[in-house]
Image (tube, rainbow, N blue to C red):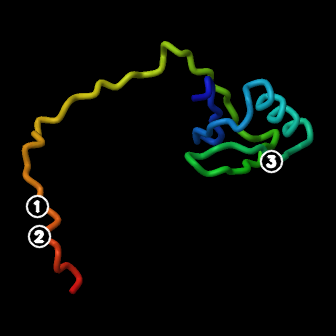
Amino acid sequence: MPDFFVRVANRRLDPVADLETTRAQLVAAVREGGDFVDFLDGTRLVSVLITPASAVTVHRVVEGARPLHAVRAGKAALDAVFPSFDAYENYGV
């Protein structure tokens, strides 16, 4: 998991490159008056047009600040009896 993410227009996007490269791409896009910078939005690669008017923030994630979610075991037991394959020998006939 990357140690930072970028928020553009209040939408969280994950970086494609490392922190320094991403910052350089953002600054270059602003200095050029606008350019596309690639990010991941979930599993999709998106190109975001960054202009001098774009609201962009870079957020660093501190390792200890990542929330940990407790995992609870369910109360359902696996004592159910599943039918054998013999019960389906005529399936599709």
Mark 1 and mark 2 residues within 8 Å of each other at the beta carbon: yes
Type of amino acid at the residue the image marks with label 1 = Pro
Local SS, label 3: strand
Left-right relation of 43 to 37: left
Q: Where does residue 51 sit, x and y in percent of width and height?
A: 81, 43
CA gap between label 1 and label 2 equals: 7 Å
Residue at image coords 23%, 83%? 92
Mark linked to residue 83 = 1
Type of amino acid at the residue the image marks with label 2 = Ala
CA gap between label 3 and label 2 equals: 59 Å
Q: Where does residue 88 sit, x and y in percent of width and height?
A: 16, 72
Residue pointed to by mark 2 = 87
Left-right relation of 89 to 25: left
Left-right relation of 72 to 63: left
Local SS, label 1: loop
Residue pointed to by mark 3 = 36
Looking at the image, is 69 positioned above or below residue 78? above
Mark 1 or 3, closer to the camera: 1
Looking at the image, is 44 positioned above or below residue 50? below
Local SS, label 2: helix
